[in-house]
Amino acid sequence: MFTGFFKGIGYAFSGFSLITQKGIRPFVVIPLLVNIGVFSLGIWLAKSQFETFMAKMLGWLPNWLSWVEWLLWPIFSVLILIAVFYSFTLIANLIASPFNSLLAERVEQKLNGQDIPEFKGIKENLRNAGKAVGSEVSKAMYSLKWLPILLIITVIPGVNFIAPFAWAVYGAWMLSLQYTDFSMGNHQLFVKDELSILRKHRSAALGFGGVLTVLMMIPIVNFFVMPVGVAGGASFWVNRLSK
């Protein structure tokens, strides 16, 4: 279990070196720009709305429960960060999905020792746009079915202390699906098939997605999570998931 988990971590970090390699760099530009734009908006919204949200939340507490404020701040800080960054990840990936599919294809060619075709402009990126966007919608629908359970865990007193852990596992699993999907989708696999494959490598998938979750929380670094995740997901596919 632990071996697989750390292998997954390694696949995620391999994305950093892959996106800087010759022949790959041109395919990174558009996903990177999309991620910078969307995440800049997400960071601004989170910062501007968090204190207002917490003031309203704490305003509902009776005076005799004012002592729990010190406990609620860190819990809701983590939850809001995960919710904001994850929701904006879905938006960014929806916009950039055709370009991410092409990036995954090129990284896979690089890892397999094949020649990488030159970048031929945006028109080539859009050739599979419909399929890529459809896959993003399927992933979003899958993610939504778990949200009611997580929300219930979050609001029930005595149970909500495990909420940050539950959200972290959820985020890691969903990011693992998110960024391995581009490579698997290039091989005509759909979300149902991809989930079956990931479940066979659950610990590695959680290690892979867990690192990406942490990287999403680091300023500046989070701008690179999308292309790094796509490239790392291609490495995960080539070296483990496709075997």
Image (cartoon, rainbow, N blue to C red):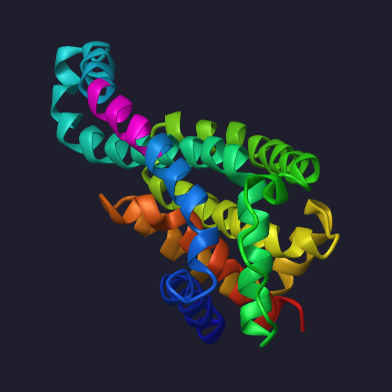
x, y percent for residue 31: 51, 49
Q: Identify the image quadrant of residue 184.
A: bottom right
Residue positioned 47% across, 79% down in the render: 10
Can I make out residue 158 in this image? no
Q: Identify the image quadrant of residue 215.
A: bottom left
Q: Is residue 23 above or below residue 26?
A: below
Residue positioned 54% across, 38% down in the render: 150
Image quadrant occupied by the C terminus: bottom right
Left or right of residue 132: residue 78: left
Q: Magenta segment range?
A: 39-48
Along the line of sight, the residue nearer the viewer: 120 or 242? 120
Can I make out residue 44 in this image? yes
Asked whether 199 falls inside the magenta stretch, the response is no
Q: Is residue 41 above or below residue 94?
A: above
Q: Main secondary structure of the magenta part?
A: helix
Image quadrant occupied by the N terminus: bottom right
Q: Is residue 176 above or below residue 109?
A: above
x, y percent for residue 132: 73, 46
Residue positioned 30% across, 34% down in the render: 43
What is the tally of numbered marks visible in this picture? 0
Residue positioned 24% across, 22% down in the render: 48
Q: Identify the image quadrant of residue 40.
A: top left
x, y percent for residue 154: 44, 35
Along the line of sight, the residue nearer the viewer: 126 or 55? 126
x, y percent for residue 138: 75, 41
Left or right of residue 13: residue 189: right
